[in-house]
Image: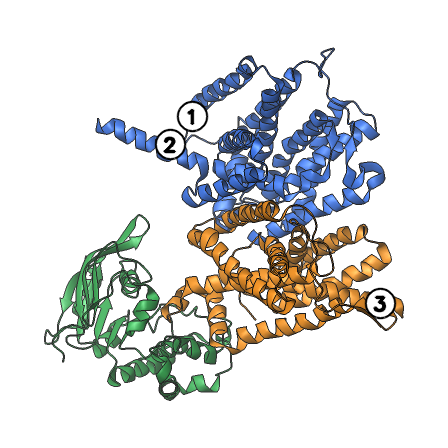
Chain colours: A orange, B blue, C green
């Protein structure tokens, strides 16, 4: 019983973090058609902003949401500075990889200069531990497991139930036609980046609450988010969400049976095998679009 | 058939073989004379690193620029070279020179293996899978810590030797000329390759896949050939790097090295080979000149990369061409 | 008929990158009613429309809509003036439903207050769309997609509607249906600028015709200048 609940909680928890990260990557890909390789750095920045605000003496309930909002601004600025000027270039996918990598390096080293290399920790969302079905879990983890689906559901209804969300989905499908109904395409691009960055920032805050933070903490989550997105298919946002939880459970199970060392290698093998069978990912639809 | 037999006919605007050969020889002779100017071992060390980076970057230009295959596992091929050499020379006790060549072969085999999952993929998916491949290699190396030293890496990797020459107390002159020779061989190979028929068909595939396929170019074979060709000297460069540094570390799989090398390829301007080599010089010298700035060095480099990418989409070569046109027009006006 | 033209294009030069498609093209539209543009393919009709609607920025010249200089404005700003362009082809938004598209049409603040009224108009004009309101565009036929395109444009509350080959590639029956609908829109008081290959339809619809050739207006035919179908065919092929 304990084995099952270990895998179950571990999977839900990891899956939640992966989903938060992957959704942002997928959102940017579907709307703009570029991959943001500084997405992991956004995660780190969110955690550090939150830490700084807490250090200023703000209570957690104000500091955390404020950090998320600041991240939205950071996402907008990144888009305006290193992505928007490149739109229309023939090799935009490749060039944006390098500009976002460079921007990521800039921010990471900036964080290193400002906050130093020493590890820091954020307060948990909720302090304390509990035992469910024979497994000890922290309330912080429970909170993440509960909050993440709520946020993802909110994002889903924003995209599917509001006119602004509709506009974002439209831009993802046809830029010319979007302009001809009067959509502000550049603002929508900025919005996609802002949403992605704030989700990444939130994931960073979640992570900073149970693990030590350092300026390069975003590298591994970025990698995992990339895998999730490849696995789930980059043409939608529901695909990556399912894939995130699937991979969370896979990792938890593999950690249990094969140990920490072999899990990443196993994961990559499964990824490559999947892509050989279904190159567009397992949950892919036929075209680019947000659904 | 040799590569020369199948060379494609020259086209208008294309530099002729003779002129390129003269430039090639003159350029590398100049490099060979550099140790006369730079007597200290620090300058020579920087030059050796430049040569290594130049090999890795220019071979990446083959798959990325000419082939249009977004192979983000290129640095893994370098890393495979590093570890193949270290394991063969240190753990298996094989002669360093044999281990060096074997590393190139192993990297080539690895490249062929990566090609299999990406054969049916396009664009961004290739980036993601090759990126995944790099991580897979790194994870396997970390997990096999008995052999590879895991995250600690390997130290006291055997170095190269040249007859009875003392490689350690020679002011790095031995390693300098080995590195330069490798760069010459690699560049010669790359230029011959891209100017051959095989090179032309790779570019055709990149520019118009459907048309090229309809004219009988095999996508599967060409992708495999491109990646394999770009892997051999990359693997050798990795092996040389391990021999020169006398250690192997998983840092070679990290994002920072990949970012630097990729910026060399893109700053140089893709599909030139020479551009990547020139950019390796510029970026490495620039980065060394700012060695005292600490974290600021990386930030300034990053900023510089962004600015150049935004302003000069075709990289340094585009910048040089633009400058040249300007000068030429001035001369004309007068 | 109004005295001043609703749309005038004054010596506009435009193109893509280094390629110039339009060479100082000049025309005035709307003084006499609907305007038809025709001419061989690849001679700049679509580029002209894209320049008018702000998708392509003109290199030189002026575009004036209803007395307002709209040269170089963004497509969004031009939509806000009520000049609405229905692009060629039926790519649209493949994964949006018809209802979504109508919602998008009413996106601009100018169109928002008229949303309900315009939706009624669209449904009356194209009853088929109402039946498939929740269906994705990719699942529709070519004719139905064209209806969605035009419907979306009507939702934008147009003061001038620009149609780029509305009947291209459609089967005769559905083509008739669309032609009737376009005539109805015109009768409803929205002036039209139409690019069309079907000369019969163009002659029936418009009172003023322009032959666009090599990126410029080659011939203008005003009302009263009687014109035979055969003469137009001669203009097409006689150069």
**Do marks 2 and 3 both belong to one polypeptide chain?**
no
Pick the front one: B295 or B202: B295
In the image as oriented, which residue stretches furthest toward the front? A57
Q: Which chain carries label 2?
A: B
Pick the front one: B45 or A60: A60
What's the distance in space between the residues labelled 2 and 1, CA to CA? Answer: 9 Å
Q: Where is residue A12 in the image (x, y as percent from the top left)?
A: 75, 67
**Do marks 2 and 1 both belong to one polypeptide chain?**
yes
- Residue B273 horizontal side relative to residue B228, left or right: left
Q: Do the residues labelled 2 and 3 touch (CB within 8 Å)?
A: no
Is residue A120 visible in the rendered image? The answer is: yes
Q: Position of residue A43 (x, y in %)?
A: 62, 57
Q: Name the residue under label 2.
A: B13
Secondary structure category for the residue under label 2: loop
Secondary structure category for the residue under label 3: strand
Q: Name the residue under label 3.
A: A136
Label 3 Cα neighbours within 10 Å, binned few <14 / some 14-19 / many ≥20? some
Q: Mark 1 points at which residue?
A: B16
In the image as oriented, which residue stretches furthest toward the top? B164
Eyeballing the image, is A61 above or below A41? Answer: below
What's the distance in space between the residues labelled 2 and 3, CA to CA? Answer: 72 Å
Q: Which residue is drawn at 74% across and 33% down?
A: B248
Pick the front one: C163 or A289: A289
**Do marks 1 and 3 both belong to one polypeptide chain?**
no
Secondary structure category for the residue under label 1: loop
Q: Position of residue B52 (x, y in %)?
A: 61, 29
Label 1 Cα neighbours within 10 Å, binned few <14 / some 14-19 / many ≥20? few
């Amino acid at each position: 019983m304990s084995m099952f609940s270990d895998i179950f909680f571990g999977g839900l928890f990891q899956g939640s973090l992966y989903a938060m990260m992957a959704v942002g990557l997928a959102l940017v890909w579907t709307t703009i058609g570029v991959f943001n390789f500084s997405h992991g750095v956004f995660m780190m920045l969110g955690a550090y902003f939150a830490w700084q605000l807490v250090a200023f003496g703000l209570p957690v309930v104000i500091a955390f949401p404020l950090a998320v909002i600041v991240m939205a601004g950071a996402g907008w600025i990144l888009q305006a500075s290193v992505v928007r000027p490149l739109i229309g270039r023939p090799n935009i996918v490749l060039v944006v990889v390098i500009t976002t990598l460079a921007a990521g390096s800039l921010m990471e080293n900036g964080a290193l200069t400002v906050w130093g290399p020493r590890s820091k920790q954020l307060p948990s969302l909720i302090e304390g531990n509990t035992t469910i079905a024979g497994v000890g879990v922290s309330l912080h983890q429970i909170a993440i497991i509960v909050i993440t689906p709520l946020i993802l559901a909110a994002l889903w209804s924003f995209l599917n139930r509001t006119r602004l969300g509709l506009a974002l989905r439209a831009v993802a499908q046809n830029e010319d036609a979007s302009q001809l109904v009067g959509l502000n395409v550049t603002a929508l691009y900025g919005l996609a980046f802002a949403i992605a960055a704030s989700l990444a920032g939130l994931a960073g805050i979640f992570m900073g609450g149970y693990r030590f933070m350092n300026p390069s903490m975003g590298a591994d989550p970025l990698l995992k988010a990339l895998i999730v997105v490849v696995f789930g298919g980059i043409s939608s946002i529901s695909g990556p969400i399912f894939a995130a939880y699937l991979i969370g459970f896979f990792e938890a199970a593999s950690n249990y049976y094969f140990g920490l060392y072999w899990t990443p290698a196993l994961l990559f093998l499964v990824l490559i095998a999947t892509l050989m069978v279904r190159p567009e990912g397992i949950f892919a639809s036929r075209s680019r679009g947000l659904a | 058939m040799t590569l020369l037999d199948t060379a494609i006919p020259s086209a208008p605007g294309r530099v002729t073989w003779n002129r390129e050969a003269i430039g090639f020889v003159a350029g590398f002779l100049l490099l060979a004379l550099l140790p006369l100017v730079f007597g200290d071992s620090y300058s020579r060390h920087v030059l050796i690193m430049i040569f290594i980076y130049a090999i890795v970057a220019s071979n990446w230009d083959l798959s990325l620029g000419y082939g249009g295959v977004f192979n983000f596992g290129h640095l893994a091929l370098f890393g495979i070279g590093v570890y193949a050499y270290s394991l063969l020379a240190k753990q298996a006790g094989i002669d360093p020179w044999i281990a060096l060549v074997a590393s190139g072969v192993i990297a080539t085999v690895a490249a062929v293996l990566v090609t299999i999952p990406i054969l049916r993929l396009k664009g961004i998916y290739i980036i993601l899978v090759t990126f995944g491949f790099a991580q897979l290699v790194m994870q396997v190396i970390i997990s096999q810590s008995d052999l590879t030293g895991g995250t600690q890496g390997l130290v006291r990797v055997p170095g190269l030797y040249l007859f009875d020459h003392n490689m350690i107390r020679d002011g790095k002159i031995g390693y300098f000329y080995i590195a330069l020779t490798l760069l010459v061989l690699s560049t010669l190979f790359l230029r011959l390759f891209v100017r051959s028929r095989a090179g032309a068909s790779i570019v055709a595939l990149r520019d118009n896949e459907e048309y090229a396929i309809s004219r009988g170019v095999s996508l599967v074979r060409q992708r495999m050939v491109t990646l394999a060709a770009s892997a051999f000297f990359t693997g050798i460069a990795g092996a040389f790097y391990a021999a020169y540094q006398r250690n192997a570390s998983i840092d070679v799989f990290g994002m920072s090295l990949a970012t630097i090398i990729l910026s060399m390829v893109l700053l140089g301007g893709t599909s030139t080979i020479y551009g990547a080599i020139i950019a390796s010089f510029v970026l490495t010298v620039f980065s060394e000149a700012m060695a005292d700035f600490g974290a600021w060095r990386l930030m300034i480099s990053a900023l510089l990369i962004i600015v150049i990418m935004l302003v000069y989409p075709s990289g340094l070569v585009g910048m040089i061409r633009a400058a040249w046109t300007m000068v030429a027009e001035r001369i004309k006006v007068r | 008929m109004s005295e001043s033209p609703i749309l005038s294009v004054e010596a506009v030069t435009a193109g893509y990158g280094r390629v110039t498609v339009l060479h100082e093209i000049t025309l005035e539209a709307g003084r006499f009613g609907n305007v038809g543009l025709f001419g061989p393919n690849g001679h700049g009709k679509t580029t002209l429309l894209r320049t008018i609607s702000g998708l392509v920025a003109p290199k030189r010249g002026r575009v004036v809509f209803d007395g307002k200089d709209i040269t170089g404005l963004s497509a969004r700003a031009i939509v806000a003036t009520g000049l609405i362009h229905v692009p060629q082809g039926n790519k649209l938004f493949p994964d949006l439903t018809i209802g979504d598209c109508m919602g998008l049409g009413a996106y601009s603040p100018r169109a928002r207050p008229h949303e309900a009224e315009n939706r009624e108009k669209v449904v009356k004009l194209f009853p088929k769309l109402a039946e498939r309101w929740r269906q994705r565009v990719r699942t529709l036929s070519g004719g139905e997609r064209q209806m969605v395109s035009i419907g979306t444009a009507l939702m934008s509350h147009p003061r001038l509607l620009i149609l780029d080959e509305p009947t291209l590639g459609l089967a005769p029956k559905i083509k008739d249906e669309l032609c009737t609908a376009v005539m109805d829109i015109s009768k409803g008081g929205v002036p039209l600028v139409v690019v069309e290959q079907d000369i019969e339809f163009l002659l029936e619809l418009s009172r003023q015709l322009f032959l666009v050739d090599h990126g410029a207006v080659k011939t203008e035919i005003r009302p009263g200048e009687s014109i035979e179908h055969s003469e137009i065919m001669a203009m097409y092929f006689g150069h």
